[in-house]
Image (cartoon, rainbow, N blue to C red):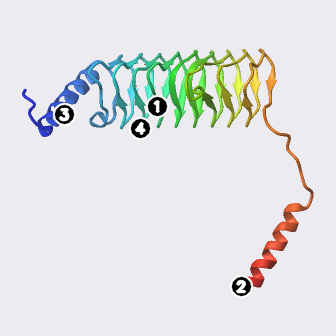
Amino acid sequence: MGVNSQAELAEAERLFQQVRREAFLAAGVTMPAPHTVHFAWDTAVEGGVLIEPNVVFGPGVSIASGARIRAFSHLEGATVASGAEVGPYARLRPGASLGENTKVGNFVEVKNVTMGAGAKANHLAYLGDGEVGAKANIGAGVIFCNYDGFFKHRTTVGEGAFVGSNSALVAPVTIGAGAMVGSGSVVTADVAPGDLALGRAPQTHKPGWAARFMETMRAKKAKKA
């Protein structure tokens, strides 16, 4: 068909998507709402994959049988192995490679990172340029600080390591196998296997301060009223 306008281009895209959806359904891909799923010309999806509504595939995506792509996710240049779960609301950018039974959850972005079998990043994280070992756990709010304003650097998280919530791993840095990073840490040096790293200020307490402050403020508010 000829394409000589934006309207004709949109119609060509609609027909292409219809053909791709029908082909994937016939191959055993489960799509409860296929009209909401958008494929690229080279998207490869094996039978036995579940794709939930409102998923967009950019170029260079390969999904193995048994994977689950949950709603409102965007994938481009990524490989997803059997048993892996992506989303909802996840973003896989070029170079993302998810091993078997991995989990990339809601509002997690993965770019140029290989995740070993069983590794998890369940919530609100950015993983850029690095490697996450098998069965490692990346907590909510974790950031791989991969860019110094001029160059990209790699972060390596070893097998079975645990990175606590709201931690920043400043690349280049390695978290050893079985190591732990305490929540809220800024990690700028390598952590040896099995070690615990804490990169935060000690917590302090001021007895009675809150009660005195609230009493004072209530009195001021009452006086103003």
Mark 3: amino acid: Arg
In depth, the one of 93 and 134 nearer the eye is: 93
Q: Which of marks 1 and 2 is nearer the N terminus?
A: 1
Mark 4: amino acid: Phe
Q: What element carries label 3?
A: helix
Report x, y in % for residue 26. Answer: 25, 21
Tags 2 and 4 in contact by the CB under 8 Å rule?
no
Of tags 1 and 2, the one toward the viewer is 2
Numbered tag placed on residue 72 in the rendering? 4
The answer for how far apart the CA atoms under marks 4 and 1 are is: 9 Å
The answer for how far apart the CA atoms under marks 4 and 3 are is: 19 Å
Mark 2: amino acid: Ala
Q: Name the residue under label 2.
A: 225
Q: Which of marks 2 and 3 is nearer the N terminus?
A: 3
Report x, y in % for residue 134. Answer: 62, 15
Q: What element carries label 2?
A: loop
Tell me where residue 6 sits by quadrant.
top left
Tags 4 and 1 in contact by the CB under 8 Å rule?
no
Numbered tag placed on residue 91 in the rendering? 1
Of tags 2 and 4, the one toward the viewer is 2
Numbered tag placed on residue 14 in the rendering? 3
The residue located at (32%, 20%) in the rendering is: 43
Tags 1 and 2 in contact by the CB under 8 Å rule?
no
Tell me where residue 56 sits by quadrant.
top left
The residue located at (73%, 28%) in the rendering is: 187
In depth, the one of 156 and 54 nearer the eye is: 156
Q: Which of marks 4 and 3 is nearer the N terminus?
A: 3
Residue 128 to residue 55: above or below: above
Circle 1 crowding by C-alpha within 10 Å: few under 14, some 14–19, many from 20: many
Q: Which quarter of the rendered picture does the C terminus lie within?
A: bottom right
